[in-house]
Amino acid sequence: MILSISYQFKVFLISLFIGLILGLFYDFIKIFRKFILHNNIIINIEDTIYWLFMSIIIFLISLYQNNGEIRIFFILGIFIGMVLYTTLISSFFIKFSTKIINIFIKLILLIFKCISMPFLIIFNIIIKPLKYFYCIFKNILKKLLQKYMFCVTIYNKLKSIKFYLKNLIIKGDKVYNDKSKK
């Protein structure tokens, strides 16, 4: 099918725009990688998914614009669009987006601090003194328990002495009674 020059120029401009969009989407992935670190395997998987997805989009646009015909000016336009985006816009976009995201993160942290502040105040007013009294009470209980255990030990020793003496008296009485009977 023969296309007019104006239509080919329109398709070329569309392919330039597609190249710009492809570069923009790849920058989103780069920004995502700055904030959430990835290892090389995950990066390769992300890149593969990105290029599969973008090739499907390019094919669908090509199908819609050129009735599925792949023309060299279409591919050249996509390539030129990506190169233009990468050289002219990409670094500024990444820096700007990173600053905006950092400001957003700081804002969220500030909001979180403001929300958590009453809880921290309550913690400092109520929980810390309770911990202090718990430590004091724990030490007192520990000392009382040690004294109790000492008393129990003495009681058990006295009990065993009492049992020993009782057995001695009973046995001694039997020995005395046996000698008196003879």
Image: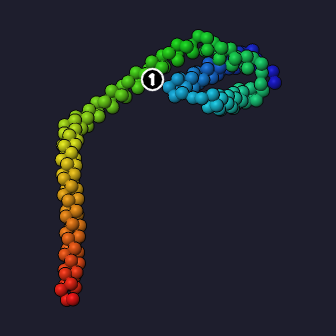
Q: For mark 1, give the secondary structure.
A: helix
Residue ID at (29%, 34%): 116
The one nearer the camera, 111 or 155, is: 155
Quadrant where the C terminus lies? bottom left
Amino acid carrying label 1: it is Ile
Could you say where residue 48 lies in the image, as x and y percent from the top left?
Answer: 67, 30
Q: Which picture quadrant has residue 19?
A: top right
127 over 102 or under it: above or below: below
- In front of the other: 22 or 5: 22
Q: Mark 1 highlights which residue?
A: 101
Can you tell which quarter of the image residue 84 is in?
top right
Residue projecting furthest to the top: 88
Q: Residue at x 19, y 89 (%)?
A: 181
72 lies left or right of 178: right
Is residue 61 visible in the rendered image? The answer is no
Task: Name the image quarter holding residue 18.
Answer: top right
Whether residue 121 is visible here, answered yes or no, is yes
- If the image is split into quadrants, where does the N terminus sit? top right
Residue 168, percent from left and from top: 22, 73
Residue displayed at 61% across by 11% down? 87
Q: Residue at x 22, y 52 (%)?
A: 146
Point out residue 56 in the picture as x, y percentages from the top left corner.
69, 32
Most extreme residue toward the bottom is 181
| Furthest residue in direction front, as rendered | 182
Image spot of residue 28 (x, y percent)? 55, 24
Q: Residues within 10 Å of mark 1 (few under 14, many from 20)?
A: some
**Colour mapping used in the image:** rainbow
